[in-house]
Amino acid sequence: MYAGSKPYGPALVHGNFTAITSSFSKPLSFAGTGFHIRRGHKSAFPLLTGTKDARVLNELKQKEVLKPEGEEVVLAVALQGLNNARVVFLGSSDLCSNSTFEGPNGKFCKETALWTFQQKGKLRYGNITHHRIQSLSDTQRQPLGYLEVAYRVQDFAYYSIDIEEFKEGRWQAYTGKTVYVEFVMLDPYIRKYLSRTGKTFYTTFQIPDVYGVFQFKTKSEEPGFSWLSTASEAPVRPFRHDEYERFLVVAYPYYASVFACVGSFLVFSFYFLYHKE
């Protein structure tokens, strides 16, 4: 098969983006133009690729092009902007035509259309909660003292967010594994993937020994799904004067030096006042 302007040939559905298309056991029929996507592109996803023996033909020079070849030849591309706007580029106007709509071509076109019009792979979030807890092993995760106000350095924090996916015409619990939270003040001090129970993603961590105005930032950038990015402000204060330990172990040498100085002064005073030559 050639990705140029040749008779129909086989094309494979890319299996890494299940949010857009499901798995196909049979190749699709395709004749048209191919694309090339820069490797590691964040916003563009290959939906349809050539078979292993696919080649590209330069129709102006009437000769084959060495690169790209095989599965590197992309025949359908999905593009999602940072504002979650979606568009799909097809290399052939016949891919979804009446003559090829029966079978795998029709299924592919329907699923691609659902994704493009935000009826598939769409995420929403809500119920963002964060508060202090007793310790990282606190299984009850009950709020300690106050809720969503200033934290203290070295406190233990609990963070959760509800995320749902629009699937099969209704909102369902999102099951992705790439949702993470960052505790940020200019730069991330903590970055952790979130655990999941139902639609609730959560984690616990210890506040760093740095005070200032931080933010809980949740991000999800799984290809094919809506981009998620949230931010919740969380001021962190230092210890108050009455919250420090009364005696610090690391300060014992200084305590000892003070008592040694006082003792030396008393001994010297007693010797100076009462000793006679």
Image (tube, helix red, strand yellow):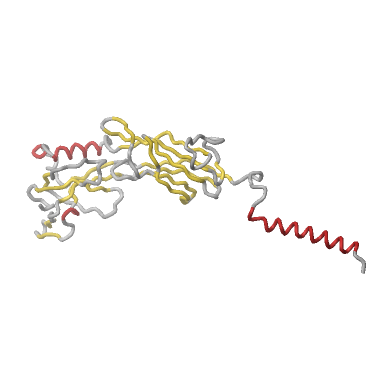
How many marks on residues? 0
Residue 199 image-quadrant placement = top left
Q: Where is residue 117 in the image (x, y as percent from the top left)?
A: 25, 36
Q: Position of residue 17 (x, y in %)?
A: 25, 44
In the displayed orientation, state which residue is furthest to the left: 7
Q: Is residue 250 above or below residue 231?
A: below
In the displayed orientation, state which residue is furthest to the right: 276
In the image: residue 152, left or right of residue 32: right
Q: Position of residue 95 (x, y in %)?
A: 13, 42
Question: What residue appears at the point 10 percent right and 51 percent down from the top-left corner?
Answer: 5
Nearest to the observer: residue 71 or residue 44: 71
Q: Where is residue 224 in the image (x, y as percent from the top left)?
A: 28, 43
Residue 277 image-quadrant placement = bottom right
Nearest to the observer: residue 96 or residue 249: 249
Nearest to the observer: residue 164 or residue 91: 164
Q: In this view, does 40 lie above or below 108?
A: below
Nearest to the observer: residue 57 or residue 183: 183
Residue 201 image-quadrant placement = top left
In the displayed orientation, state which residue is furthest to the top: 170
In the image: residue 89, left or right of residue 258: left
Question: What residue appears at the point 15 percent right and 61 percent down from the top-left corner?
Answer: 66
